[in-house]
Amino acid sequence: MADEVQRVYVASVDEEGGNSLALGCFSKEETAWQVLRTFLKKSDQMLLKSSSVVVWDIDVIGESGVTVLSTMECKDCPVCGRRTFWMDLDNFSALCHGDACAAWVEESTVEPGVIDCGWPPIRFLKQAKDIDEAFKELFKIGDQMKAVAQVDTLTDNQPQEMLEEFENQSSNESSE
Ligand SMILES: [Zn+2]
């Protein structure tokens, strides 16, 4: 029986109050990750503290049957500000799961000790000497985005102003 399940992958999230929400128990690691990632996209709608994926070996008594594959902590995203920024503390990496953001921080695989960070929507990519500096870079992007958003709301009025200007000009011309 090659298909017999030997291990199960369990995804769960912890709320700030201490409640644990089970997201399911899966026969494939990839499925557990997919379910967790989908859930984390909406994590700004809840007060979550951490998430985990663990693997349980079937028919093993006690704690030796369980292995923690990943634990992640939830933070506010430096760029979009939503609480969808998940940090993997074991193998340092962090990613915003929020829609249209995907800001990330990760230790360089090429140069150990160097921290890479990026924001895909504008293809921003930067190397930093430590985690603090990487976060500062992302906060800068966040500030720029906020500034752009304010400019956007200003330009909402511009068509009206331009129209008024145009009407003034054309009435001047007709009176000449
Ligand atoms: Zn974000």
Image (cartoon, grey):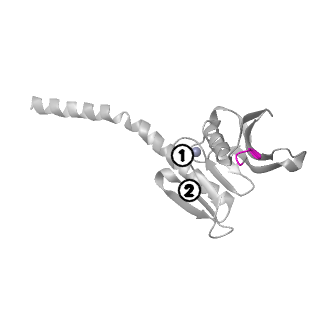
Disc 1 residue: CB within 8 Å of ligand 1? yes
Q: Position of residue 30 (x, y in %)?
A: 64, 47
Q: Secondary structure at mark 2?
A: strand
- Asked whether, in this view, residue 165 is left or right of residue 140, the answer is left
- Asked whether, in this view, residue 118 is left or right of residue 63, the answer is left
- Asked whether, in this view, residue 8 is left or right of residue 129, the answer is right
The answer to whether residue 83 is seen in the rendering is no
- Residue 118 tag number: 2
**Residue named by callout 1:** 101
**Which comes before the other along the chain, label 1 or label 2?**
1
| Amino acid type, residue under disc 2 in the picture | Gly
Residue 42 vs residue 175, the one in the foreground: 42
Disc 2 residue: CB within 8 Å of ligand 1? no
| Quadrant showing the C terminus | top left
Q: Position of residue 160 (x, y in %)?
A: 31, 31
The residue at the point 64 percent across, 58 percent down is: 106
Range of magenta residues = 2-8
Residue 117 vs residue 26, the one in the foreground: 26
The quarter holding residue 16 reads top right
Residue 136 vs residue 92, the one in the foreground: 92
Asked if marks 1 and 2 touch (Cβ < 8 Å), the reply is no
Magenta region, main secondary structure: loop
- Asked whether, in this view, residue 157 is left or right of residue 69, the answer is left
Q: CA distance from mark 1 to mark 2?
A: 10 Å
- Where 166 sits versus 57, above or below? above
Q: Is residue 53 magenta?
A: no
Residue 118 vs residue 19, the one in the foreground: 19
Residue lying at the far bottom of the rendered structure: 111
Residue lying at the far left of the rendered structure: 176
Q: Secondary structure at mark 1?
A: loop
| Amino acid type, residue under disc 1 in the picture | Cys
